Image: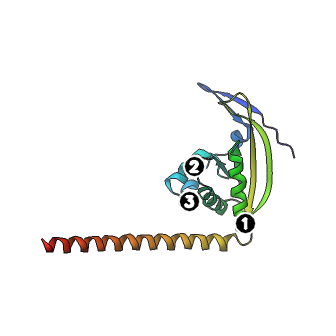
Amino acid sequence: THTHTHTHTHTHTHTHTHTMEDVTHEFPTKDEIKSVELSEAERRELDNTKSSDTIKVSINRSLFFYVDLAIKFLKDHEVVKLSALGYAITTAVTIAEILKGQDVVVIKSIRSSMTNVPERRSQKPKIEIGISKTPKFVEISSKKEKLATDNKNIRDLLAQKRLEVHEQLKKEENQKH
């Protein structure tokens, strides 16, 4: 399959350059965004993404941020697209391979194209990797979640203990004087 990327110009008060795909995607509703419990950063990522089945991968975030985000997206969608431009392509491929290695996803499609970037004259390479759940997805992703929750609980307990010990030391310190 060949992917052709066309440039559309919309005239509002200023001109934007969009690829066709950006234009045709629906924006997720507020409820769709709320339906998944997300951190602030992830909620921003969702807002930036503008389409609920596509994750725009950038080089500014950790691989595991995207691995977790992809798992969250897959709970609501049959196929999730990892979309990346230029240097971020390596990151997108790595994310897909990590998820595949964990037996969480299968790779459904890979589409490459050249796309216009508003801030540059030349075109940039683009990749879109379609991933979907394996039969083991639910089992593995719920194990991951339980692990994350357990780790958080342990961290909270440790923090609590540290506070108690700190308070105790302060008390003893004050009794000496």
Residue occupying the point 79% across, 41% down? 113
Q: Amino acid at mark 1?
A: Gly
User: Mark 2 vs mark 3: which is more N-terminal?
Assistant: 3
Q: At which x and y percent is residue 66?
A: 62, 56
Disc 2 versus disc 3: nearer the observer: 2
Residue at mark 2 to residue at mark 3: CA–CA distance: 15 Å
Q: Amino acid at mark 2?
A: Glu
Residue 40 seen in this snapshot: yes
Q: At which x and y percent is residue 35?
A: 56, 59
Q: Amino acid at mark 3?
A: Ser
Q: Tell me the residue that label 3 is attached to.
A: 35
Residue at mark 2 to residue at mark 1: CA–CA distance: 24 Å
Vertically, is 11 above or below 176?
Answer: above
Q: Rate crowding at label 1 as few (under 14), some (14 to 19) or many (20 or more) other CA atoms within 10 Å.
A: few
Vertically, is 65 above or below 177?
Answer: above
Residue at mark 3 to residue at mark 1: CA–CA distance: 28 Å
Q: Is residue 76 left or right of residue 152?
A: right
Q: At which x and y percent is residue 142?
A: 61, 72
Q: Tell me the residue that label 1 is attached to.
A: 101
Residue occupying the point 56% across, 60% down? 36
Helix, strand or loop status at disc 3: helix
User: Mark 3 vs mark 1: which is more N-terminal?
Assistant: 3
Q: Tell me the residue that label 2 is attached to.
A: 45
Check whether the beta carbons of the residues at disc 3 and disc 1 lie within 8 A of each other. no
User: Mark 2 vs mark 1: which is more N-terminal?
Assistant: 2
Residue occupying the point 74% across, 61% down? 132
Helix, strand or loop status at disc 1: helix
In the foreground, 176 or 102? 176
